[in-house]
Image (cartoon, rainbow, N blue to C red):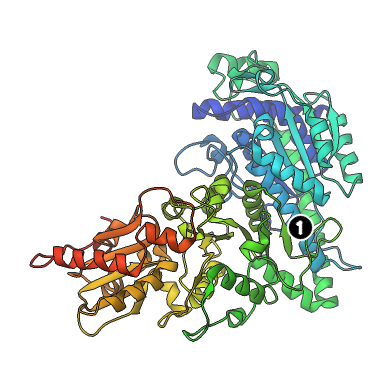
Amino acid sequence: MSNSVDNLCVNTIRVVAADMVQAAKSGHPGMPMGMAPVTQVLFSKHLDITAKNPQWINRDRWILSNGHGCTLQYIILYLTGFLTLDDLKNFRQLGSKTPGHPENFLTPGVEVTTGPLGQGFANGIGMAIAQEYAKTKFNTKDFNMIDHYIYVFLGDGCLMEGITSEAASLAGHLGLGSLIYIYDDNNITIDGKTNITFTEDVGMRFKSYGWHVQTVEKGDTDLEAIDNAINEAKKIKDKPHLIILKTTIGYGSKLEGTPKVHGAPLGEEELLNVHKKFGFGPEKFTFPDEVIQEYKKISERSAKKYKEWTELFEKYKKAHPDKAKELEDFISGKLPEKWEEALPKYSSNDKPIATRKLSGTVINKLAPVLPFFIGGSADLAESNMTNIQGEKEFQKGQYDGKILRFGVREHAMAAIGNGMAAYAKGYIPFVATFLNFLGYCWGAARLSALSHFRVIYVMTHDSIGLGEDGPTHQPIEIIPLVRSTPNFYLMRPCDGNEVSGCYRIAIKSDQTPSCICLTRQDVPHLDGTDIMKVEKGGYVLQDCEGKPDLIFVATGSEVSICVETAKLLKDMKVRIVSMPIVELFDKQDDEYRKSVLLEGVPIISVEASSTFGWAKYSHYQIGMKTFGISAPYKQVYDHFGFTPEKIAEKAKALVKFYEGKTVPNVPSVADYDF
């Protein structure tokens, strides 16, 4: 395996990685210098991607969970035609395609955004779940349309993060054999040798998870052993694989094997020494012709496999036209026609019901008409109402099930959802827990928004209204957290029509995750709600004749309370605004927003959550300023002032306060960006 061309490729990767970090004056040269050999083996012998179609559905996936070593990935993407030499030279510079950590939305060939350690590890498991389910949909006895591997590089930091334990445990349980994970075991973290914090037996740990584990002792030089390990992994189909690769961080530098080579440039003098050691002159960003030609052959091999696949697909279309059409839609993300007709509608004559139960009804209505609407709960399916009637569980050897059992693994669950969304545009993964435990998911949930992944977060028990479980389970800060996050829809529907409307928006928003917040307690179906009105974000639910004396703006379970409050205010003209998706309301033009939240009228916001952010829409905010308490939910609502009687008193006081005064405009109706 190891020959002069291979060695030249390895050393070129090492040198150019150090050049990139030096040119940027920041970065991480150590990992790429240590993992250059395994990368060369992977691309010369195993991994197939093609710049001819970066989204080819049957490409192998390659993820850097240790994303700080991204110069390694960028160099390979240059050599295989995805990037230019100028892209490498502009590493970490403004507007470049080579940012400081891999970003899926910026760089062609990058599958997922990584950097926060352990995320890529869990994303790969989501991809493997997505692949196994897709196989059951599209592969036939005669046509293997989806059959590839998912390779993930990871380091010591990834293995220390808790998300990795969660995800690895589930992957072993599911027997996901397409996963080949390569652990850069270099014994170094930023603070020093790993033995100051990390002395467990990693191999035994992963064997206990049900993984197939191998060790390559000479990862710096023994390319043949690396190749043999990957080949051995491919022989075992019913277990995920971990290859423990013993490497030297910063191999070839005088700083090798030390933390100093982890996160800083080598310096010009030491960089010149590295150039000399590996047989290069002082000129930076040098790619010998032999290396360019070798990767041209590698790219031609992958392009040939892609061409063979497209030819196979043409035969597939003739043999299985319906499946072929579905596969094309799956790849493009096209939704089935008339899927929206499955969304249930309600009237005020229907009995009150908790929005979590209404959500469960929607999930069960949509699952049959959306083939890749798939998901589950973190051990709370009966509470989250996420079970799909008549569907099987996704389990080892039963990969055609649409019900995912994540166990009590919230963080991994969210990252797995990201991996599924990244696998193909057609996937619509949903993940579920109590809203309070979105905090446990947050590292991955934030990346859903950053990465433009359509992951639907089904978050029940959405407020102090869950009652007896008390303040540990009553979220009062999570809603403003999500609302403050760019490209994330926080949805808080008030009844059945709004639940359906929220799911409609969540499914149509293929570049944005959604957090649908749902009640434990029953709520009535209200006059004035409508599935289509939800797309405005906020709208007039109930109105009065003429100009109102007061406007209530509320979300979720508090909308119906405001409706009841208005009945007590017999001497006032009251408008009630439901605002299930604040972010969409903000996207409406100023004329529409002014037509909803009228100028010159006192406005009260009501939400059983933190009042943070509501000053943008109201003159007075009724909400939570403390943590909750444990009691039956009606007592909790009364204690914190969320009853019609107590809200009515506040309303009267606000109107009286503005008597004879000019009511100031709330910022939402003059929110200009100059």
**Secondary structure under badge 1?**
helix
Q: Is residue 438 left or right of residue 528?
A: right
| Front one among 529 and 398 | 529
Residue 371 place in picture, x, y as percent:
71, 71
Looking at the rendered structure, the kind of residue marked 1 is: Gln
Residue 247 place in picture, x, y as percent:
75, 24
**Residue occupied by mark 1:** 131
- Position of the N terminus, as image quadrant, is top right
Residue 230 place in picture, x, y as percent:
85, 39
* Residue for point 64% across, 66% down: 385
* Residue for point 70% across, 43% down: 166
Q: Is residue 319 above or below residue 618?
A: below
- Position of the C terminus, as image quadrant, is bottom left
| Front one among 89 and 225 | 225
Numbered-mark total: 1
- Tell me where residue 604 sits by quadrant: bottom left
* Residue for point 65% across, 51% down: 413
